[in-house]
Amino acid sequence: MADMHNSRILLESGTNEIEVMKFTIGGNLYGINVAKVLEIMISGPVKPMPLSHPAVEGIFKPRDVVITVVDLPKYLGVESPKAEKDIFIVTNFNKMCIAFRVHTVDRISRISWTDIQKPDKTVSGGAESVATGIAQCDGDLVTILDFERIVAEIAPETSIQMSEVERLGPRERNEKPVWVAEDSVLLSKMIGDSLRKANYVNLHMFPNGQELWDALCELPEEKDLSRDVALIITDIEMPQMDGHRLTKLVKDHARFKSIPLIIFSSLISEEMRIKGRQLGADEQLTKPEIAHLVDVMDHLLERTAGSKAR
């Protein structure tokens, strides 16, 4: 059907906008960031795989590429028979290609991240929620799914691994303040736990770029910034303010631009890397490479300390 590389509208960098592809499951509207979508195709024959997660339907092989298929209705607890007109949304994030079975695909809406709200814990399940936000798209209320969390649950070995940090060996305690913007409750905990394991003990976690930016702007003018924030790590996809917008604001600001900033995201493609570079990001790393993140943090903080010493 549609190759998203050729048909998507390329967003300008740092505008705090997202393109949401709407799709249906059981009559309900859901959404996915178009940046995660490689292709949309009519569902085809799937070969079951033994001993896999109940929501893993199996594998299929379009054009000589083997792709895992996740039965999204089943994962969400929607009982419905598979149909010939079902759609596969083929995605690419965290360096993995996965197809998600859905019932229909609707249009693409371009909206601001400020139009996406975190769901209330009474309906979202709190930390267990698979909804990263609720958006108003063309008059429709759309649930934006946390596909990273879904994949992390189905295949934990593909997500952030504490063992990678443990292999770095004993490390000195680092008390430099590190600010992290990450909206996923699950991934925020994983990142925080991993960095503390790496002996980064002064972490400040924010659920989106807007709250981190607001906290930056509230720092007193006369204070030495490095005592409050020595390094910023940001995801890209976040309600209210995304990581690209946050990067632009930080790097365009005379007072904040010297703060090292790392984009740590599942969406780091060559296109995204160019955008991040244009916005001034010091480094861009792909999830779930947590040991690489620690190495880069060490390097940037040492470089900053060296420049100040001179």
Image (cartoon, grey):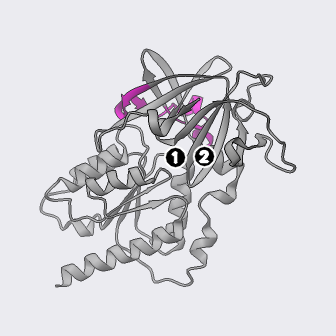
User: Is 230 placed left or right of 174 in the picture?
Assistant: left
Q: Residue 81 or 262: which is nearer the viewer?
A: 81
Reply yes or no: does residue 59 show up in magenta.
no
Q: Residue 152 or 2: which is nearer the viewer?
A: 2
The residue drawn where x is 54% and y is 66% is 194
The answer to which quarter of the image holds residue 274 is bottom left
User: Is 63 placed left or right of 49 in the picture?
Assistant: left
The residue drawn where x is 39% and y is 45% is 208
The kind of secondary structure element at disc 1 is: loop
Q: Where residue 106 sits in the image (x, y, percent)?
A: 54, 21
- Quadrant that contains the C terminus: bottom left
In the depicted structure, whether residue 163 falls above or below residue 56 = below
Q: Amino acid under label 1?
A: Ser
The answer to which quarter of the image holds residue 166 is bottom right
Mark 1 and mark 2 residues within 8 Å of each other at the beta carbon: yes
- Quadrant that contains the N terminus: top right
Reply yes or no: does residue 128 show up in magenta.
yes
Q: Mark 2 = which residue?
A: 149
User: Is 294 placed left or right of 103 in the picture?
Assistant: left
The answer to which quarter of the image holds residue 113 is top left
Circle 2 crowding by C-alpha within 10 Å: few under 14, some 14–19, many from 20 = many
In the depicted structure, whether residue 278 falls above or below residue 16 = below
Circle 1 crowding by C-alpha within 10 Å: few under 14, some 14–19, many from 20 = many
The residue drawn where x is 51% and y is 24% is 142
In the depicted structure, whether residue 191 falls above or below residue 185 = below
The kind of secondary structure element at disc 2 is: helix
Q: Amino acid under label 2?
A: Arg
* Mark seen at residue 118: none
Estimate the spatial distance between the alpha carbons at disc 1 and disc 2, rounded to whole Å: 8 Å
Q: Mark 1 = which residue?
A: 184
**Which tag, 1 or 2, sits closer to the chain's start?**
2
- Identify the magenta region: 109-133
